[in-house]
Image: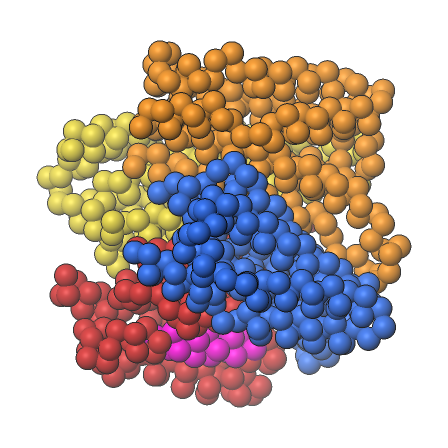
Chain colours: A orange, B blue, C red, D yellow
Amino acid sequence: METNRLEAFSDGVLAIIITIMVLELKVPHGADLEALKPLLPVCLSYVLSFIYVGIYWNNHHHLLKACRKVTGPIMWANLHLLFWLSLFPFAAGWLGENHLAALPTALYGVVLLCAAIAYSILQRYILKNQGSDSKLAAALGRDFKGKLSPVFYLVAIPTAFYHSWISACMYVGVAFMWLVPDRRIERAVAGEK
Amino acid sequence: METNRLEAFSDGVLAIIITIMVLELKVPHGADLEALKPLLPVCLSYVLSFIYVGIYWNNHHHLLKACRKVTGPIMWANLHLLFWLSLFPFAAGWLGENHLAALPTALYGVVLLCAAIAYSILQRYILKNQGSDSKLAAALGRDFKGKLSPVFYLVAIPTAFYHSWISACMYVGVAFMWLVPDRRIERAVAGEK
Amino acid sequence: METNRLEAFSDGVLAIIITIMVLELKVPHGADLEALKPLLPVCLSYVLSFIYVGIYWNNHHHLLKACRKVTGPIMWANLHLLFWLSLFPFAAGWLGENHLAALPTALYGVVLLCAAIAYSILQRYILKNQGSDSKLAAALGRDFKGKLSPVFYLVAIPTAFYHSWISACMYVGVAFMWLVPDRRIERAVAGEK
Amino acid sequence: METNRLEAFSDGVLAIIITIMVLELKVPHGADLEALKPLLPVCLSYVLSFIYVGIYWNNHHHLLKACRKVTGPIMWANLHLLFWLSLFPFAAGWLGENHLAALPTALYGVVLLCAAIAYSILQRYILKNQGSDSKLAAALGRDFKGKLSPVFYLVAIPTAFYHSWISACMYVGVAFMWLVPDRRIERAVAGEK
């Protein structure tokens, strides 16, 4: 019951983030295919960001289910994560409007990186709260994906200034890697009950 | 309890979608009837889209009530549905601003079609999860409406390039057909308890 | 438990409506008092509309607490109410930008009137569902306020074309009349328990 | 259970406020560093306001947990608080676009002050409802932070017209002071159970 309101608030913020991103898809003035064309990259960037927010919601859902008591630091670590996620609409909109230009592509990676770091901080606080011998800790194990993603982002950010499409591919690749929900936690929680 | 957060998140997204559509009704600069006139088609398209999102919320509500456990694929099938529904404000705004021009009318149908397909995928995953001999499966039966709607959309999309008002009538017609909530599932769930 | 999701969805929509109205308060370009001045009427119209949505949320809260089972017609009556409430940001924005011009003042009244009618339809469906001898029915009694408000709106709409400030005063007056929450229902529900 | 819907509604509004503030970060047209530069002050003002809304959400969460029954005045005191918080996106946007110009800096303080007053009114009503000998009353004690903050805002508002950066520092300072969640209430509620 303690975590209910934190979940509800995070759900609210995530639901709004995922939905206001679509506002970057500005209704064009013309009514022909020409008018739709410049929207294609915006649309692709929207799809990618939608998937990323979906991944975060998914993992956040599982992580919080493993959390039994919300403390002050957990609350703020959660808000910190929401802050970086709230920059997704901006980063996605800028990326979409500039066809993989260097700086927007790099900035998109920076936002992804910061969100990943914020998530791992939140995870650490919840782990600390549960005890390092908890099932959650065992389930996360070496946390392969969580440690690999920031490395990819760190490589993708400077790469954006040389071959921005490689960076874009890396963002897409990491998303695919995460599309499978974090079954480790899922399993551990199920086993605990 | 498992499905609570999925419901809450979907409700949040649907509530935002249904409300930001009204942002397409831009406040006009004049204060006379002339200023309101160009808003009439936008308003009609808003009403139709509001009804469609209402229908989806309604059916989604009943469908999730029949779902007992949320799995990874169900979560992603749900997000996939929300993605297509999130394009309603864009499609409705473009349709409203262009008085039934061919392409916007067709695109509106494409979004409707994709949402319908996404809904049926979600339904299939929940059915699979419940067992095909479940009451939900029996209740859905031949799923008359669910199978008829995509056919209408498929006919309406090419028709938009010849007589777009016929397509518009079809969209309105399908909405009317769905306005009656999915009592089959409602009944089955009630019977199960 | 049946009414939970209807409440949650309505809360979501009302929370968004009440918040996106503030988006009509566009950030001015200048940084002096001159830049703020044209925002004053927009701000006043925002305050009034905020109070109206607050009143609706309040009464809706009490009404739904008296409702035990959500039926199809109740769901649609509720969506119908939310539709008219969703037009508040538009009506408030237009009124605020045009300093009590005739048509925007009248339109504001039309939206208020339609929302009031939609509310009374929802109330009727819930009453029908509870039986006319229910405590809710007894509590509502002659429903003085609910019957008086539409009369005021009906008078205010044509008046807007002659002396729009009289209409505005009437809108403010009705809001004041409603500011006291609907204790009749509150009391009846408490008595029932 | 009584307070659930008030919490849900407040969470919804706070989630929307915290998220639409990011809409003030308009996607720039260029794709270079020059295009990002004017966004820096907007971004800083967004960060500060995000923290303030986070603080309010945090304290509001604890305060409402101490509240056992929602009365009419508590409902309206809560809406009154939400009203002032809903002006944060506007005040933050204006401040961010005008690099600490006098009037926007002062207005930001006015909104902060009004929100602080509204919060203390809500706190008083909940206290009255709980009895002055309740654990909440004991926990709040002299309510040091709650009484100090408005003093800071009151000093910062006129100061903005002379040295606006001093006002900005004070806003930041108060935020830091509050970043520690209100453990007094937290502890009292825990003790009560």
> Was residue B43 drawn as part of the magenta stretch in this picture?
no
Residue A140 lies left or right of residue B28; in this view the side is left
* Callout count: 0
The image quadrant of residue A49 is top right
Residue C114 magenta-highlighted: yes
Q: Which image quadrant is residue A101 in?
A: top right
Query: Which residue is more in the foreground, B80 or B20?
Result: B80
Percent x, y of residue C48: 45, 65
Q: Position of residue C64 (x, y in %)?
A: 32, 64
Asked whether residue B140 appears in the rendered view, the answer is yes
The C terminus of chain C lies in quadrant: bottom left
Q: Residue furthest right?
A: A34
Would you identify the image quadrant in which residue D180 lies? top left
Give the magenta part as a residue range: C107-123
Q: Nearer the viewer, residue B28 or C163?
A: B28
Query: Residue C129 in the image: x percent, y percent?
Result: 30, 74
Name which residue lies at 55% across and 49% down: B124
Q: Is residue D45 left or right of residue C118?
A: right
Residue at 63% x, 67% y: name it: B148
